[in-house]
Image: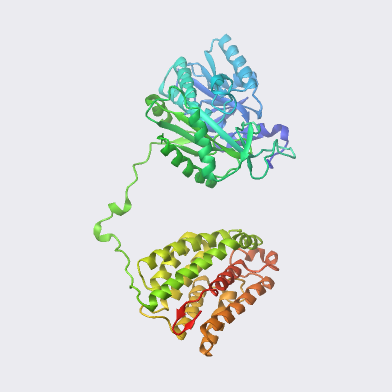
Amino acid sequence: MTRLFNDPARFTDDMITGFAAAHPGHVRAVPGGVVRARPARAGKVAVLTGGGSGHYPAFCGVVGPGFADGSVIGDVFTSPSAARARSVAEAAEAGGGVLFLFGNYAGDVMNFGLAARQLEGDGIPARCFAVTDDIASAPADQTARRRGIAGGFVVFKTASAAAEEGAPLDEVVRVAEHTNARTRTLGVAFDGCTLPGAEAPLFTVPQGRLGLGLGIHGEPGVSEDTLGTAEDLARALVTGLLADRPADAGDDGRVAVVLNGLGATKYEELYVLWGAVARQLDEAGLTPVRPEVGELVTSLDMAGCSLTLSWLDEELERLWLAPADTPAFRRTPPPEPPVDAAAARPAASRRPERSAATASGAAAEVAELAVHALRAARDVLHRDAEELGRLDAVAGDGDHGRGMCKGVDAALAAAEKAHTDRLAPAAVLAAAGDAWAAEAGGTSGALWGVGLRAVGAALPADRAPGREELASAAADALTAVTSLGGAEVGDKTLVDALAPFATAFATGLRSGAPVSEAYASAVSEARTAAENTAGLRPRLGRARPLADRSVGTPDPGATSLTAVLTAVATLRATTGSESV
């Protein structure tokens, strides 16, 4: 929802005022839109982008050297009037004529066309070009009927670069036509956008579905499909575009690519999608040239994205890569090729491979037990992931279940490899702990990492551990966790479950109880303690600022620890003369 506005009827005017005030080095406001802060050189073609507002950074965000000379700005999703277009053109014109660039929409075609005729009547050469890149809006044999969406960004960039090089008006128009003929876009929507002052979005998409073939003025998709994974979406977008590949696309496979967010699809999501798109393009034999991933042609707060491919030739690649400096887009020379840091480092400074003792006999069985324990932990954490996330979301960020799954998956993979290499229990658990901490991240990841390392360090490399060594392993894990995290019993953390477990386990072992009984009794103590954390107020971590909200909900860290300890209790392996 668009929440920040004064009078909805003046939303665009207020936006222009703020935009110009924020970027005085690039633009100045004029009636109808904005133009470059510094006039272009005499004789240069003035390239003007335009259309309704609500699409930032298109269209005004790309005004500046190397890109547009000005932007004609209409009300939200509304074509600007011919009077606005003429006003901006007169302010930007430098003697080389004017080219209006916009999407293929009836209002834009009509108003920009009228403005161009009026300028021609006043002796100012003026041309119009409407972008038609949206493959979902008309079939391949009716490209002139297609809408202009995010592919307009590529057309605007190449035409503007040609004008910056000094090309005359007819040549700049030819570049726009040539780029457009090689540009294809397909978009999807996950939910609609809301106009300033409106109480509901222009359309909605059912949960778990997507609208295929969206417009950028709040139009829903032309059809619906199931919302799958990022890999599924990448495949659908790339496949759709390749099926509409231009006839004169050439054979070198070099493409300008724009993966565009529509306003509410965040950059992290787009990068996940781009990873999948890049793989699909590689498999298709295409080479992305300076791909752009981000919000370039938005639709207010629409949730969705689009993929644009523009097949390059030598001329278009030069223009696509040409420098530009605007409020929302800067093109600088490409960075140097990446260097293999390990190969570049002097041989003497490279780290040697870490060695570890080899396990044999009973110690190898303990290492195998550690792997089985991690498998049990993996199963229970994946089973409980949603619930752990729900507990964490009460007063935290809701990522505990996801983080624990990432951590245990990495730990298990590392432990299996170490065990295959016949490493001792300490090395197996150290590898698991390091992998858990590295992949899970956050507080829980670090604490589980040091805890697993501490358990391993207490185990002998040449035999099964004795009762005192098992007690020390639990105590050492507690010490490592509390030393790193600083938590105490009562702070509402996993320490509230780990401390009673370690104490009860050591007490049971030292009383002469069988290992399995001592362990089961300790797990029972931990479970009760974890449940009792519901009555505590957190004194550490992200939950502390929302401590009152947390009361009544058990701590997710203590809950996940208890779940893992309980799952491990089902395992049986020889440790000395007893089983656990």
Q: Quadrant of the N terminus?
A: top right
Coloring applied to the structure: rainbow
Q: Is residue 207 above or below residue 306?
A: below
Q: Quadrant of residue 287?
A: top left
Residue 191 position in % (x across, y down): 65, 40
Question: Would you say residue 72 is visible in this rendering?
Answer: no
Q: Is residue 133 rendered to the left or right of residue 362? A: right
Q: How many marks?
A: 0
Camera-side residue: 147 or 22? Answer: 147
**Image coordinates for residue 540, horizontal then vertical, percent:** 59, 69
Q: Give above or below for 133 relative to 573.
A: above
- Rendering coords of residue 379 (x, y %): 54, 64
Measuring from the top left, give residue 466's x and y in whole percent. 44, 84
Q: Residue shown at 52%/19% (left/top)?
A: 99
Question: Is 409 drawn above or below residue 70 in the view shown?
Answer: below
Q: Taking 89 as reference, is 424 left or right?
A: left
Q: Residue at x 70, y 36 (%)?
A: 203
Can residue 230 be spotted in the picture? yes
Between residues 440 and 323, which one lies in front from this camera angle? 440
View extreme (bottom): residue: 511
